[in-house]
Amino acid sequence: MFWGLKPQIKDDHSTMVTCQEAMKMCVSESLGPTHMVILGQKVGQLSAPPILKQTDLEAIFKHLSPEDTLVLKQWYYIDLNSVPPVYILQPISHILGHKKTDWPKTEEKLLAMLQKGAQWCMENGHIADDFNRNLHLPGILLNVLTFPPSASTTSQQDKTWMGSIRDITDMHHNLEKIRSHRFIDIKQGKAEVIPKLFTLHNQFAETIIPSKINEDNLHTSKIQWAEPHGVDPVVHKSYIDDFCNNFYRTAVTITDTVNKNKHQFVLHEDELCHDVSSHWRIANDIEQWCLRQDDYLGKIRDYILDPEGEKPLVVHSSSGYGKTYLMAMAAQETNRMLKIYNKETTSVVAIRFIGATNESRDIFWLINSICHQIAYATGKSRCQLPKDYKGLKSSFMQVLEAGLFNGLLVLLIDGLDQLSSNHEALSLDWLPHKLAPNVKLIFSTSSTDNGILEKLNHLIMQEDQYIELGSFSSHTCNEIMDMWLTKLDRKLNHQQSKRVNDAFRDSQVPIFIKTVFEEVKWWNSFTEVNEDSLGSTVNENIHRLFDRYELKHGKIFVDHVLSYITASVTGISEAELEEILCLDDKVLDSLFTRWEPPIRRIPPSLWQYLRIDLMGLLVEREEDGLKVLTWFHTTIARAASTRYLNTAEKKQYIHLHVSDYYLGKWSGTWKKPRSAKESLIERNRICSEYDPKLRYVPVQPLEFTVFNIEPRFNLRKLNQLPYHLTNSRRPELANKDIFFNYWFIHTKLRTGSFHKLIDDFSYTTNPQAKLVQDALQHAKKALLLDCNALGPELCGRLLSQFTSSPNIQELIHQCDLAAMQNCALVPNHQSYNAPGSPLEYTYQIDTDLSANDIYLIENKETLLMCAKPALIPQMRIWDIHQSQRKPNLTLPPGKIFYTQNGQFISLFRGTTLHMYKIQNGELFGKINYEHGQPNNVTVGNKYLAFTLVKAAGPFLLDMEAKKVIHKFNQQSQIVQLSRNEKYVLFNAGRQLEFYEIPLMERKISIDVNDTPIKIIFTRNPLQFFVHFQRNNIIKYEINLTKKSFTTMHIVEDLEMQEAILSHTEKYFLVRSSRCLYLADTQTCKVIRQLHLEPPGVFMEHLATFTGAYFTPNDETIVASRHNYIGIWETKSGQPLRLLQASTVPIKALFTSSRVNKAFAFLTNNSMQIWHLDNIERGSQYSQEIFTGPISNISPSAVSHGTGTLVCHSNFNAEAKLVDMETGICIRSIEHSENPQRRLHETLMSLDGKYVITRANNTSTQSGPDWTVLREDSVWEASTGKHIYSAPNSRFAMFSKDSQMTVIIVATLFDPKDWFATKYSAIVYEFETKELQYYELPRGDIISKPFISHCTGRLFYVMQKRMIEDNPIDEPDVWYEYRLIFHYLSKHFPEPRLYRIQDIWKAAEKHYSLIDARHIHDNNILLVYRHGNNMLPYHSDGTVDRSEPSVKGSVVYDPYHEQVLKVIDSWFAQPMSNVEGIVVSSQETRIIDDQLKTYYTYTSAHLSTIKSKALNHSTSVHLLLDGRYAVVIAHNKNEILVFRTSDAIQKAKVFVHGTATCLTTGSDDRTVIVGTEDGRIQMYTLILELCDPVTEIIEKIPSRQIHRPKPNLLNSDIQQASTKTFELQRQSTAHHYKVDQTIKRPPPYQSIEKAVDIITYNNRIRSQSCCVQ
């Protein structure tokens, strides 16, 4: 406790007092051993007591000589501020000045005087024996003797103490050795022990210590002296090892015992209990130091008891005014009050101190914790609470608005301004607009920080809902000071009290009282005070305290300690602080100025002495399962930050050392270099200025693992490293160890801290890291269910960025390498919705809307997309920044208009303008005007102007003053306010009137030749553009001085629809039906025309542009036509991208002036958000092949993830070819233009060159019984060219060498006699283009035919009916099952038919063939059954082979006509369906439809896959020669992989949708999945221990770094071309619907209205003629 202390600390004799305080802290905080006594033969010198009771010392004075009493009174001053009074030993420097070397002799004299007087007093009974005894004990022995046992100890022996007594047996023979004084107390200059101290040592070693410490915790050892050091690490190695081992074992035993007996230290099983208790504990601690404020508490009590209150109560003030004190008192008072007033009902009082922990700053944690507490208190199920923020927010608001429980809920939230910005919490969108009568919500917030109070003012308009805290009176301040001093048994004298009272005239806020208290609590009664003793401000007092700490403990040491505490915003534990200081060479160099210890670590006692002084400024909080220290108040934290973290370099230095600690950079045996001073180099013989030293700081793994013990996560590293590492300004290291580190992300997910993981990414601005963040958010649902899905989720979303980002490339590489350990399915290409693509996300709107019902509203806080149909009294809102939907606003029917700043919305209701706050829909005001229907409306921030239909106008309204300020008496159709709202422009017939606001002075009138329909002002209010009814645009520039104007014609187009001024006002864009005109605003000349008609892409011929706008800074132009979005570079007019929104047209397009995004509103009532910063990236949001589910997949031969597959959907007759390298559709094949046709199957040759599409049959013979037959078409894959078609097809297949295709067609079919069916085989050879026909034997085909590769023969099993005439009775009928060999050659036209008995001579007579499978080496697996009865048929004409029967199989070589292997008949259960039997690629394993796996060589049953995620109808596929089975889970949302040898699940990936089909590739590793939303996912299985993981992954095309970069525009066009057939079908269906509508006669009301319109138009025309 005394090593390394500064001279300033020893000067005031506070070491022993501080030591005792530290020992008390050990008892209160330790969860195991509290003290360790290590006793050698040296006990130390006696020292004068630093503090003596007044009664004891004055009793001694009476029995000493006047000279001795005078000496004692010179050194001991009475402190009357202590209660009771005490005498305090004065600092050495205060009495001796610079003669500090005289202190040892002086101390010896003082001690002798005290011992002499104490002995006499004790003999006469004036003082206690203990006092006299203590004067004869060294400090260490005194602490051991007098320190009380811990509270858990019931006996005299303390079981939490540990001890070790060491005896050097030959010490007395080595007293003359140089180093002997280090091991035993000897007389100065003599080789003799001090008898008195030697006797004390023996007494403690033999009696006192054994009586204090349990014998199991006390260890003794005897050694002999070893030269030259006395105790040598080599000679005494066994002693040192025994000491370390005994210490470890004893510490573990004590820790286990204490934690087993102390139930209060057992970790809470329920996190809710822990949260609630910790915040109530804080409230209890704070209340003990509070003075009641009855006036404020009375207002809070009245609010709680008011049954009509519907709004929250807000307590606010500047920082330091005692808001937290008041909230703590209010919580306790409310609890007491409700126990009195609501005895019969359940009342819930919830208190949360935001900022008390790091978690409490997060709105997700706050709402989640409160919702769980309310659910628990009201008896609701907590398991049903939502897990995501959106759901929790909705549930929270619903509870507060509805109050659906019996009782009163009082919720107090302190420090609303301390919320983090996560989830846009500072926007307060999580607060309900209205509270239920039984819900009371009380907030406290700063009046200045984060603008929270201003936002609350928008939500809560009533002034009586606010309590503003003011300063205390001086009298109250003195009361608080006296109360606090009394708790410490302290007081002040009159002069000091007067000075404190004077200080309270300068400030009376609680934080000022606190800082004054921290200063005056150290004042003794003899301390002289003056005007400079206290500061006049909070900061001045804080800096005075810091100055005192620096003077006493050392400037550099205090500077860096307080810097680390300040930099750790969520707190730092004492152990962490000590370890970090050991890494700080500036601190160590300031301490080791004259001597370098062998281990370069900070003396542990230094921090303890400073900790005692800092106790009043620090508070303990629990964070990550540890007690951490943080500043008592934010004001102190700000002052410390200003003082100690005042430069960027200092901040970086501090964060660097903290991050190095959490990284474990210098842990273990890693030596940290340091720069040594020249004096130390010479004195300590340091060989180098940069001599590295071990620091022995602990290692920092992501999790701590011990054998047979559940691993514990290193929460401190996981939660603190991101903040400190990013602030150390080492982005490369942060990327490597955090943001692109798979194991860091995976481990943090395992802790269940998904939202914390997302929050970590807020520390970085790296755009690639933001992509990872977006990918994690997209994958949230899967990751919350299984964190091992991290690898597939990240790879499946980020692979499109693989070549463009080295960091993402490294992250994906880590995911791949972790596959075998966590998830063995590695995505081959983008499988899920990907971040970083132009399309960000899609909102689905469940109401039919028009383009005029959509509004894009921007303000300084957010960007809102609003939907408000004129006839519906609700407005839906989507927050674009938060990517979430906000609560609906209830508004009257009508069209809305919003202010330029996006703060307010207005709508007309009758003759009244209603104004609402857009944040909460609260009515802001009303303005009444004369009768009339508004026609054209323009809105600024202050004013609103509008014209009326068929009435005089326009009107000008002041929205702030809520009144009409002017009405014009003109027949006006258009009105517009200038951007600065200084002028208003409107038409009066064929004149434009220009007025100044608010004087309403007409500045100029402009004659025009046409009626304007739109006016566009520039930033210069004297320049504007007018769009006239004749579809021409003219620019006007006004000169108010000369009362003149100039005009410039821009463009004229009869199909002109809209005119747009660019954001920089350099360009003017005119949107026509099929053309965009881009003009220069200076010259008013059209510089280019833009069209959206890409070649090879289907475009509806009647489609027009539905929107065209500029992006921010006018870099690009975005326009929509049909279902495409075109993007051009503004400067050059060069087309950049062609984005396809969907297969449905776009109704409207919007862009923002602040963010580079476009918003497309589609005809299917969905809204798409496009991020235009990502148009240079080639990734797609979702690689949908079809808009509907994929029904069938057929791949070509797969080699390292390359190849082609064909797939189709059941909703049309279109097949699509997909590149297996990228997962992108490369070609579409339309089987038929008939919209009624549907594909049932698609096949692809192994070489990927040819495709067969199989559709429902349309033959004239077709009927209900022919549904099994198909119409087959063969296509060339590379060109989509049709080769030939075959109707009435039953089977189609390719040969294994892809040289031919065989289609088996039914030439004769009798639905009443299945055996009368006649089949023919059509063979088409691709190379020769020769078509051949072969008649097949009469009978029914019951197995799927296949073609042998080497023999070129067609194989299948046929069921034949055999009839033999019987002259006596009916003909004999029996059934035979034959294997058909059919040579596909002209030279061998006749097939060969074999029974099982012909192939396998040992087969019994009743065996019959039921299936034939083609396996490797051109062998055939023949499955037979016991029995030869007729197989039943399904209604569609297919054979039902699921009839229960005993089965067996043989492996047959048809080329050599011999049986190679016989598999016992019990390999498949009787109930198993032969159609569900799957054979591995090398036929070593067979699995049946009951998921039972058999080993074919021994017919042994290996395992049965049983899982709750599967059902009996699960279709299974085998991988890696049957060692693994892959299936679709019963919920269709997961793909599972099982090891067949033991049925253990080895991998799981999430589909994020519904899986519809699954197949595997020919490489036995590739898994291909089709989904309901039209996506195709491909994975590679990496699971075998012998798998060359790196080589397999490197050969996957998506993992290859050097790939050619595609032309994005060409890729867009190519992708769009694959949608041609689908768009054509939709267009045809749309036109058919329109034609039917046109043919339908209109109702009478429509005809009547049409006649009225025609009459009205004729009347207008005649009036015009009269005017002419």
Image: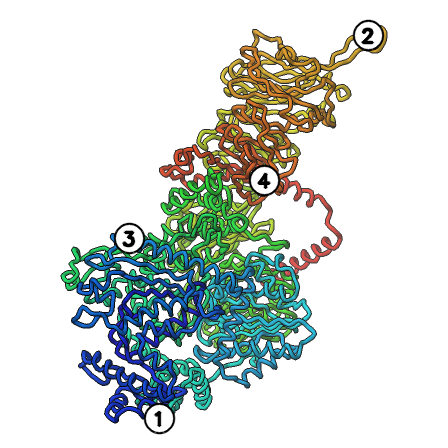
Whichever of labels 2 and 4 marks the residue nearer the N terminus, that label is 2
In this figure, which residue is indicated by the disc labeled 3? 237
Who's the residue at 21% across and 64% down the image?
Answer: 180
Identify residue type, mark 3.
Answer: Lys
Whichever of labels 4 and 1 marks the residue nearer the N terminus, that label is 1
Within 10 Å of disc 2 (Cα), the crowding (few <14, some 14-19, many 20+) is: few
Distance of label 2 from label 1 (alpha carbons): 138 Å
Judged left or right of residue 193, residue 513 is: right
Who's the residue at 58% across and 29% down the image?
Answer: 1242
Distance of label 1 from label 3 (alpha carbons): 63 Å
Distance of label 4 from label 1 (alpha carbons): 84 Å
Total marks shown come to: 4
Q: Quadrant where the N terminus lies?
A: bottom left
User: Helix or strand or loop: what does disc 3 sit on?
Assistant: helix
Whichever of labels 2 and 1 marks the residue nearer the N terminus, that label is 1
Could you say where residue 831 lies in the image, as x and y percent from the top left?
50, 41
Within 10 Å of disc 3 (Cα), the crowding (few <14, some 14-19, many 20+) is: few
Depth check, mark 1 against mark 3: the one in front is 3
